[in-house]
Amino acid sequence: MEQWVYLNGRYLPMAEAMVPVEDRGYQFADGIYDVLKLAGWRPVRFRDHMKRLRESCEGILISDIPSMAEWESILAELAERSGLSRSLESQCILYIQVTRGVAPRNHLIPEPQPQPTICAYFKAAPHYTPEQRAYGVAVSAQPDERWLRCHIKAIGLLPVVLAKHAARKAGAFEALLVRDGIVTEAASCNVFCVKDGAVFTHPEGPLILSGITRGIVLDAARRLGIPVHEQPVPLSEFRKADEAFLSSTTMNVMPVTVLDGVPIGTGNVGPITRAVAAEVEAIIREELEAGVDLGAGLVASSQVGK
Ligand SMILES: Cc1ncc(COP(=O)(O)O)c(C=O)c1O
């Protein structure tokens, strides 16, 4: 895939896409982002991602961003230039970032506000191994040191960069974030555990990012008749779970079988995790097959329920 970047109304090869040093995203992490997955030219849950993008912008007082319909045409043009395959077998990731724009360095939000710096590009979807899917991954409990507006998908990611680094150094795949003894989520995914046949996950609110895939997991559990409790789970209880799993746009569902070097439950991928993972895949496949390509009226289409 050729890497083309949409940057403030222009389409540029990656090497030519430059942002000024005084961009507030660069100097203050004053911006937000979103990550979508596409099969061919069809994004998974486009409306949900666009809604979250808008709400993240509103959360940091940025208002001048493209409408959903404008995004659709920007992204269709970008897909064309990037030579994106239309085959539903071909998956990729879309990264979108909005910063407050360029202004002389000063903590105060400039008034009037500068034009936001808006960029987007497609990139290859990360690869997860069949072993990770079959045997699950390990997580390492790390302190959740983020700010108290985690529902905003802010680009200031240092706390999770450091947490994930610490988890990797401890031999784990992901950091299980713990605030005041409660498991919130992971560095870049939502977290679920299973006890006595029911799924538990942290409720939505300022302590977690409300993952789009988390929403699909809840839909999947509902379809399967599996009870879900959106309630805080202490780390001490999480350690006693029968099963655990992660969810994110790039992974869908990833089983977790080890916490801090100790097996969770039997240490194997459990039946609820397997069922939810398969149902999430089925929901995504159904939605994509019934979906509409970027640029073909995706936003206007009544077929796009989500
Ligand atoms: C902190 C955090 N939680 C959860 C998620 C999962 O969100 P989604 O399912 O929308 O990818 C992400 C994704 O980047 C994340 O960064």
Image (cartoon, grey):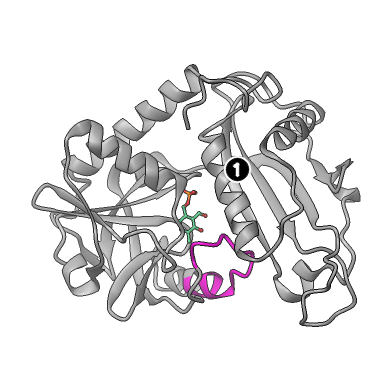
Front residue of 45/15: it is: 45
The residue depicted at 39 percent of the width and 68 percent of the height is 171
In this image, 1 relative to 269: left or right?
Answer: right
What percent of the width, then of the height, locates residue 134?
Answer: 30, 41
Tag 1 residue: 50
Quadrant of the drawing holding the N terminus: top right
What percent of the width, then of the height, locates residue 255?
Answer: 30, 49
Residue 286 versus residue 58 in the image, above or below:
above
Which residue is farthest left? 196
Magenta residues, as a range? 150-163
The residue depicted at 19 percent of the width and 42 percent of the height is 272
Residue 283 versus residue 132 in the image, above or below:
above
In this image, 133 relative to 81: left or right?
Answer: left
The residue depicted at 45 percent of the width and 51 percent of the height is 211
Q: Is residue 233 magenta?
A: no
Which amino acid type corresponds to the residue marked 1 in the rendered image? Met
In this image, 114 relative to 53: left or right?
Answer: right
The residue depicted at 61 percent of the width and 50 percent of the height is 53
What percent of the width, then of the height, locates residue 158?
Answer: 59, 74
Give the quarter of the image for residue 225. top left
Q: Is residue 162 magenta?
A: yes
Q: Let me know if residue 135 appears in the view.
A: yes
Residue 167 versus residue 270 in the image, above or below:
below
